[in-house]
Amino acid sequence: MQLGMVGLGRMGANIVRRLMRSGHQCVVFDRNPEPGKALAAEGAIAAADLAGLVAGLQAPRHVWLMLPAGAITEAAIQELAGLLAPGDVIIDGGNAFWKDDIRRAGELRDKDIAYLDVGTSGGVWGLERGYCLMIGGPKDVVERMDPIFAALAPGLGDIPRTPGREGRDDRVEQGYLHAGPNGAGHFVKMIHNGIEYGMMQAIAEGFDILRHADSDQLPPEHRMTLDVAEIAEVWRRGSVITSWLLDLTATALAADETLSGYSGYVEDSGEGRWTVQAAVEEAVPAEVLTAALYTRFRSRQDHTFAEKVLSAMRKGFGGHVEPKKGPAA
Amino acid sequence: MQLGMVGLGRMGANIVRRLMRSGHQCVVFDRNPEPGKALAAEGAIAAADLAGLVAGLQAPRHVWLMLPAGAITEAAIQELAGLLAPGDVIIDGGNAFWKDDIRRAGELRDKDIAYLDVGTSGGVWGLERGYCLMIGGPKDVVERMDPIFAALAPGLGDIPRTPGREGRDDRVEQGYLHAGPNGAGHFVKMIHNGIEYGMMQAIAEGFDILRHADSDQLPPEHRMTLDVAEIAEVWRRGSVITSWLLDLTATALAADETLSGYSGYVEDSGEGRWTVQAAVEEAVPAEVLTAALYTRFRSRQDHTFAEKVLSAMRKGFGGHVEPKKGPAA
Amino acid sequence: MQLGMVGLGRMGANIVRRLMRSGHQCVVFDRNPEPGKALAAEGAIAAADLAGLVAGLQAPRHVWLMLPAGAITEAAIQELAGLLAPGDVIIDGGNAFWKDDIRRAGELRDKDIAYLDVGTSGGVWGLERGYCLMIGGPKDVVERMDPIFAALAPGLGDIPRTPGREGRDDRVEQGYLHAGPNGAGHFVKMIHNGIEYGMMQAIAEGFDILRHADSDQLPPEHRMTLDVAEIAEVWRRGSVITSWLLDLTATALAADETLSGYSGYVEDSGEGRWTVQAAVEEAVPAEVLTAALYTRFRSRQDHTFAEKVLSAMRKGFGGHVEPKKGPAA
Amino acid sequence: MQLGMVGLGRMGANIVRRLMRSGHQCVVFDRNPEPGKALAAEGAIAAADLAGLVAGLQAPRHVWLMLPAGAITEAAIQELAGLLAPGDVIIDGGNAFWKDDIRRAGELRDKDIAYLDVGTSGGVWGLERGYCLMIGGPKDVVERMDPIFAALAPGLGDIPRTPGREGRDDRVEQGYLHAGPNGAGHFVKMIHNGIEYGMMQAIAEGFDILRHADSDQLPPEHRMTLDVAEIAEVWRRGSVITSWLLDLTATALAADETLSGYSGYVEDSGEGRWTVQAAVEEAVPAEVLTAALYTRFRSRQDHTFAEKVLSAMRKGFGGHVEPKKGPAA
């Protein structure tokens, strides 16, 4: 099958590579010509611009965008919508906001262009492990593109099958899911990332407590020095919390159990924020997913204004004068 | 009435002053002789040591400790227990852990020495406003010391009376409460401080959001610059959140609405931690009181180890490399 | 001065009454004719519809809406915009979403109609205590309406003045604030309510821990029975947490310290949710304000789906079978 | 090697079975004679009481306790301490509080009896998968018992090895770790369970938001019905949150995606509470681990007293009367 790919960053380029390994033909484009050249050397057709990419595809065309969410994706879709013909398909594989998908799909539908929102998980490992795909959009289009999704997904692998799934959709066990109408793909991916934040924070807090088991806040007879790298490793086998995130933690701690190469400044992407917004809109309590997000907000500041307000009140009622600077972490 | 006061820091000295204003006689002691001299000039009798303090009081003696909680208070009680006679009373007005009160009261009871635990709120303002007192211990001793408590408490003042209190204990409206048996005084004070942490954090977070209403995280058409000092002031009249803590916030912001004199490093005292422990022991969910405590823990670190673990995982699955340093708060 | 009032629920009707006490003339309208009749008997002019209300006012007209936020307010503004003339003013005193204010103000500006968003705090007590007003909109309109705002605000009262406010806007001490451009009024009111949620939750959790001080989760020697009504009362004098919310708690507990008349089902209004959204948009951590909101979400469910997922996992890894029903609260 | 096992519940009996599969000899005892008989039929020696168990072992004896934490374990250790001889070893494989381990180890050391605390993870799956073991105690005893630990641990299995572990302790990759001195084993197990709570809650909240994607709190154009069983399944392959807990969730949802067989009442064991206490003692912020615990506390009540306090305040300031009963979850 043929696919156009717009945006050849790490994710986009590796998706192209994984598709070509399965015999699919890819026409590719990126504003930066370098990654297109590299992929052309591996068998892709590199276009010079979006018009060229569209011209290089046979109708009905399938154009997958792997671009930063927001204005850049929006602009590319606008331009593509002017180039494509009725019956063509735009796939947004980036991290779009699900309400934008619903809006966009409606706008494109007016032009008889179909739209799929495909939440794509897999990161830098996807080329080898495959990508977990969460797809929103019209059933017929999803089915027509099945060869693409099947090629990208991880497949059954050696993961034990879930008992009791007899009679259910086989594609899901391969690692791709038609989650529902437009918006559903990115909604499910958003929640995936929300859970990811929460699981990461749970692991992170646990290791923080382990590392401070020798804290002088504890009475001397209760202090102990623990080897966090060994602890991460032992939990990988037979424990309840075995997980890929724990595997990654074990790898990082094996390299340097102080993690001194990391500043502790942690970015967040839109999905964590949108997850909290969805919880609030649905009136679902989501303490853990929210706390995980707020921890990242806090990590990027020296001090919050809130903390200064606390100090000011403490001085006001108790005359407390806080130290100018705390001890190192 | 006569009272011995051990510990003449700001709280202890001002309690003595407020008692003397009501005609009570105070025998005072502190390891540092200066505050005792100052109080002697105002009418107190300064003792040179605990033995002298005990010798200066008529039986039954009432000795109030206003010392740092923990080892220092514990040592003073041990020494006093050897000096006092059956029928005498030790009052701990500091911030003891309520389980220590229960233990201590039992130990002293074996020597026929009574013990009161008196949670004392009022801070630097107590001398003028009076002290809110939460008292744990035997009823007869609490009643015998009523003149002391009545003198320390704020009294009715101009605070409107709570409707529906007819027939209830009049002392409570004066600002002092016999809360229950030993431990109850400090238990109630502990929860007071727990609530204090939570209310402070609520106010602090609100002002943090106000102050960042001009954040570049918002689209330009939604940004606005708000005057947090004026906002604190306007809420002091007719709003639902009128409170002393808001008054103090307004005062601090009127002086400097950037609070640039505060580092943002915030101490916590034992009560906040004990409140969380009590919640956990009772299996009562206490999200807000706990979050308020954790914010203070976080404020005293440059970065947590947990944050570094997050970054390490992010690098592991997504190749994300976090900045070395964040923007200023 | 003349004011039109649309929406004569408790808030709207009492605002009219407070204005008439100061000699202002009010033309009023509500779909339900009863409250208009009642106010007419007190001196207001009751209109039969919006057109009648507009006809009853002299230009430039000032029409205050006190309607449920959302579609009802939106519809009334649309209708009014067609009836009013350039130079007239619409004031939304309800609980609108601040981004809607910004949008609406722009739409009305195109018709030369001014718009004010006025966050109004005071609840059922406003008629007597006055209303705390947080105003967003153009400076000249705010100044022209000063007599209205001054009449509604609580005034200085017997609240001590904040030291260090010399040279600042005197109106703020009266209890009304021109917070900024359109949207600022409701933004500030939103944060007020967010803080209100957090302070309420802090108080509520504290009393929950107090009430369970006799829990059988504690060892027998640590259990105590505490009188929560008396504790609320004693904290009203001289403690750090004195506040109107504590006063209200004391009143409720004096009437029935078990609060058995309350189910524990707690509504939330939009402001709490919008506060969390603003925090997330600004990337400001707001643990306490968010936890307070989530507690309310949780209070309205028998059980969450999340809890069932937990039980299912526990059965999966440990064979744990949870009880069908828990003990009473 | 020989091992005595006291406590033949599911965990204890399966540990015995797994040891016998590797050729170890087990002398077993339980107050209930049935499981001992069953194990005797499989090759164990069933003792009639602790004295009989001790008599059945050759010095130096190794007696493993797999009993409920607290008084029962404490009593068994007291009795055993009187029966064993210098050089013998007691192993507590249950879920003891780590500070109790430190105390007990000291008491037993006075009698020349060694003590190991062994956190044991594996649940009902341990017999087949093996047990993840976290061991605290003296190095020589841990090394002497290596054949036992090696037989119980899962072994390398087909789990990929962590890169960069060259030169580290090989035993850890087999799934057992000498974590440190007495207390360290249960400390590490405690944190494992704390993380487990947090990860479970993250997954649970995510599925709660997914399930309410059709909520009438959302505008109609944004509602969608999602198949949570299929979503759990697709995330098992190639996603970032692949984990055993997700596998278990997928199994439960495949059986019944409404989870209607679960009430939503969720127990907690001591480890979650102790984790929070450790965080508080160390002054480490642990928002997520704590929120996960509080959710369980909340799940076991119809309504909290805190919620009633909220309603009482809302009635006080706003006249709000809450519904008597909420809608079903």
Image (tube, coloured by chain):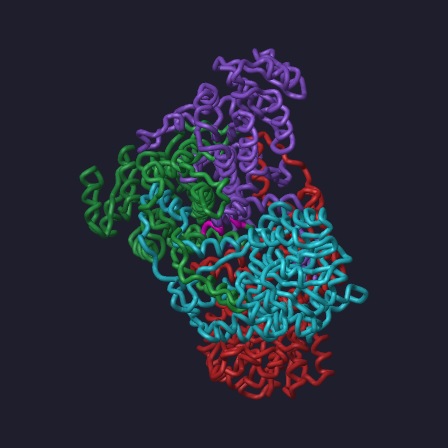
Chain colours: A purple, B red, C cyan, D green
* Magenta stretch contains residue D288: yes
Write down the quadrant of residue B199 in the picture: bottom right
- B56 or D292: nearer the viewer: D292
Residue displayed at 57% across by 88% down:
B58
The stretch of residues the image draws in magenta is D286-293
Q: Is C80 located above or below residue C172 in the figure? A: above
Q: Is B53 located above or below residue D156 in the figure? A: below
Q: Is A27 located above or below residue C126 in the figure? A: above
Where's residue C48, x and y in %?
A: 58, 62
Secondary structure, magenta segment, majority class: helix
- B157 or C107: nearer the viewer: C107
Question: Count of labels shown?
Answer: 0
Q: Is residue C151 left or right of residue B146?
A: right
Q: Is B150 located above or below residue B117 in the figure? A: below
Q: Quadrant of the N terminus of chain B?
A: bottom right
Where's residue D202, x and y in %?
A: 47, 43
Where's residue D282, x and y in %?
A: 55, 53
Write down the quadrant of residue C7 in the picture: bottom right
Asked whether residue A228 is in view, the answer is no
- C101 or D184: nearer the viewer: C101
Q: Is residue A195 left or right of residue C159?
A: left
* Magenta stretch contains residue A214: no
Residue displayed at 21% across by 47% down:
D47
Where's residue D97, x and y in %?
A: 42, 53
Q: Is residue D218 left or right of residue B5?
A: left
- B224 or D43: nearer the viewer: B224
Q: Residue furthest right?
A: C167
